[in-house]
Amino acid sequence: GLEHNKLMNLSFQTFKGLSLQRVNLDHNKLEFIDERAFAGVSNTLEFISLQGNNIMNVPKAFSQLKKIKHLDISLNGIKRIEEDAFSTFFDTLRYLLLSGNHLTGVPTIALKGFTKLAQLDLSYNSIEAITVDDFKGWGKSIDTLFLQSNKLSYLPENAFEHTPQLQELNLSFNNIKDIHTTAFSKLADSLYKLDMSFMQTKEFPEEALKPLTSITILFLDNNAITALPKTAFYSFGKLHYLDLEHNKLTTLPVGLFHSNVHKQLHDVWLSYNLISTIETNMFTSLSELRSVALTGNYIKVIKTYTFVQLPNLITVSLSENQISVVSEHAFIDIPRILRLDLQNNLMREFSLSVFQNVSTSQFPMALNLSYNLISNLFVSETQSPLFIKVLDLTNNHLTEVPVNFLNAVSPSLRQLHLCHNMITHLHNTAFGNLALLTLLDISNNQIKGLHKKAFIGIEHVQYLDMSHNNIEQLHVQQFSLIGKLRIINLSFNTIRSLPRDTFLGSKLEKVDLSNNKFVAMPSGALAEIGYTLRHLDISYNFIEHLDSTMFADTPFLTVLNLRHNKLSILPDNVFSTVQSILKLDLSGNPIRANFKHIFYHTQKLRVLNLAETLLKSVPILPLPYLLELNLSSNYIAEIDPFSIKQLYQLRSLEISNNLLTSLPSQTWHFLPFLKHLDISHNLIKILTKDSFSGMGSLEHLN
């Protein structure tokens, strides 16, 4: 294509000698097209797009086109279209796009000869009215008509009488205040998709829509509809998708959705209205219903028998309401539900008695109860089996692990989120028997004490997050019963040390001990996972000393974060036993060391952070594969070419917040692949034409 250039005109026989079928000239500056610009391709060209140019009139050059099927002249400045503008391809054109121009009416006089036109886009113009005669004589083949974002205020009697094949109609973003009861009367057998969103409509146009017995997709969202009659959708026996979101509905009449009528209804979207009550049996025996969205309303109670006999229902969203009570048996006979959202409500308690014959082992569901006020969870003695795969209880008022509740859903539970509660202790067998659990998040609680056998029964957990608690110590073999554990986060606690056998029996790959109170490396505890550990974060602690013996039992580390400790003197061989390391962060430590010797054994290093380490010069780094280097917030006054000569592969260099007064132009050729350079917050006063000489690959400069 030739799109996104600066072409201003097309001259005589522009495409001479070519056998073009498609030409894309979108987003140029075309103002003039010679009458014979397409000479030579008039019998081959089938697709032409001139979107986003400066064309004021339909070019006479189109009279050369004989086989064109797709013509796009949208986003130009066309106000009027001459009678013969499209006359040479009346029998071939199928797609005509005129959106984003300045048309004030349907250009009927120019369209009257079309015989095969299937799609017409008149959106984003200034059309003020349509009449029944606008489509007369040429509209019989139209199946898609876009009229959104115009200035329509009225749909007249039999408005679409002459478009009997119309399947898709978009009227959104108009201010249509009045619709004649027969406006759609001739579309009963054809129209399947109608968009009337963003029209400021206050009343549901029941009589006007009633003839549309073939409608399957109906958009009425973002209007101001305040009420629906019980029979609003009784003509729509083929309806699949209904969107009424962002209206002003306050209630839904009982019987609005009828099992004998809406046998094909899949999706009902009613979010962000003013609905305060959902009546009993509102959603009952709708055999094909897949999803119901009621997010962001004012519902206070989910009544008994609200959702009943819905064999194919998959998702229900009731989040962001004011629900304080979900009644017993509110959900009955919904075997395939996969997701129920009840987060961001006002529930203080929740019972499994709300379910009866809900979910199966084949289709376990995700239950989201987060951001409520729940302090009590109950089970039902007459409860039918319930299969929950993901249980989210984040941000509630739980003071202990709800073990009885968990045991009731234990056969299927794989993910459990208990973060941001008020749990203070994990007792013996705190979680019961959750044999399938793989993820456990109990972060952001007030946990201080852990029983040695707190994790019995969750031996298949792979991810455990206990960060942001008040944990001071862990027991010997604390995690030995979680043999599948791969990732553990213990950050933001008050742990000072770890017993040697803390991780015995696990296969941890990633350990986060940051933001604790360690004064020494817990080398003994890490030795138990030495052959699986790849990622260790022990940043923001109080470690003062490191030597090579501390990593002797963790030789396969690839990521090591020691940021913001109290490290000062590092021996030359400190990293000699972790030669596979790829990413190392030593920032925020007052280090004194011979970096040339320290990194001699870490030749594979790709990312190194030495920010805030009191450096006065760029250290010599024998790191031929280093890609990212951070030297920011130090006291570096100049860059010695010899110091970076060995960093040939470097892609990113951050040296902000230093004391540089000039740039070493003679140095940059040593860094031919550098793409990112940050030299902000220095003392540089002058830039010359040579300041960045040799930086041919640079993409981002700060």
Image (cartoon, rainbow, N blue to C red):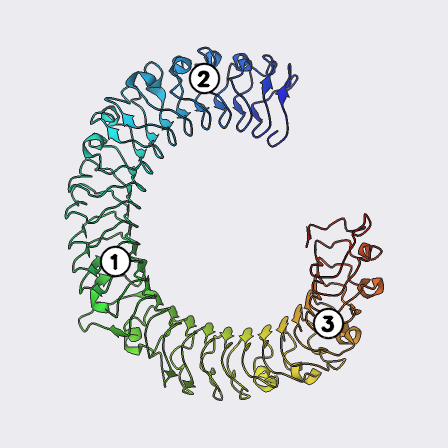
Which secondary structure lies at badge 2?
loop
The answer for how far apart the CA atoms under marks 3 and 1 are is 56 Å
**Hey, which quadrant is residue 403 in on the image?**
bottom left
Report the label total: 3
Please name which of the two marks, 1 or 2, marks the residue nearer to the observer.
2
Q: What's the amino acid at mark 3?
A: Thr
Mark 3 or mark 1: name the one nearer the start of the chain. 1
The residue to which callout 2 is attached is: 80
Front residue of 352 and 459: 352
**Hey, which quadrant is residue 630 in on the image?**
bottom right
Front residue of 455 and 51: 51
Mark 2 or mark 3: name the one nearer the start of the chain. 2
Q: What's the amino acid at mark 2?
A: Arg
The residue to which callout 1 is attached is: 335
Residue 602 numbered tag = 3
Q: Left or right of 678: which side holds 522?
A: left
Mark 1 or mark 2: name the one nearer the start of the chain. 2
